[in-house]
Image (cartoon, rainbow, N blue to C red):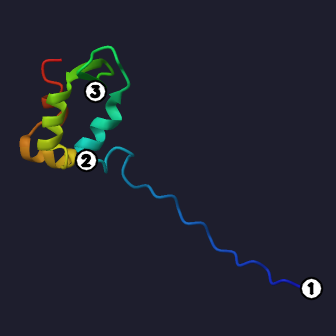
Amino acid sequence: MNFPDPIQTPLDPPDSGPAAHEGLTIAEQIETMRLESADCPGESCFTNTRGQRCWITNGVVERFVRKEGAIHPEEYRAVNGVEWQSLFFRGI
């Protein structure tokens, strides 16, 4: 029995879209920065933009995410003139 040759199609070029974190909302970026830590009950541990571990009270994190989490970092920067991390990690 003869089978037809399989159809050869060129591979689609790889998508060069945005970097992995660029399409994420602020809330999603915060979750990628969150570290598992039981060192400080009532606080969450994050890696800041300098790679340092920072503990932030859960209530502060929740309020920030509720207020700013749904927007994208580019929008936050355009409206506020600064990166969202400068407010999230202020004083750290």
Element marked by disc 2: loop
Mark 1–mark 3 Cα distance, whole angstroms, equals 63 Å
Of mark 1 and mark 3, the one earlier in the sequence is: 1
Measuring from the top left, give residue 23's x and y in whole percent: 31, 51
Q: CA distance from mark 1 to mark 2?
A: 56 Å
Between residue 86 and residue 10, name the one nearer to us. Answer: 86
Task: Tell me the residue that label 1 is attached to.
Answer: 1
The amino acid type found where label 3 is placed reads Thr
Secondary structure state at the residue bearing disc 1: loop
- The residue at the far left in this view is 80
Image quadrant assignment for residue 68: top left
Front of the two marks 1 and 3: 1
Q: Which of pointers 2 and 3 indicates the residue nearer the eye?
A: 2
Quote the CA–CA distance across marks 2 and 3.
16 Å
Q: Residue at x 89, y 85 (%)?
A: 2
Counting residues from the N terminus, which is met first, the one under dot 1 or under dot 2?
1
Image height of 92 relative to 59, above or below: above
Task: Name the residue beneath numbered marker 2.
Answer: 25
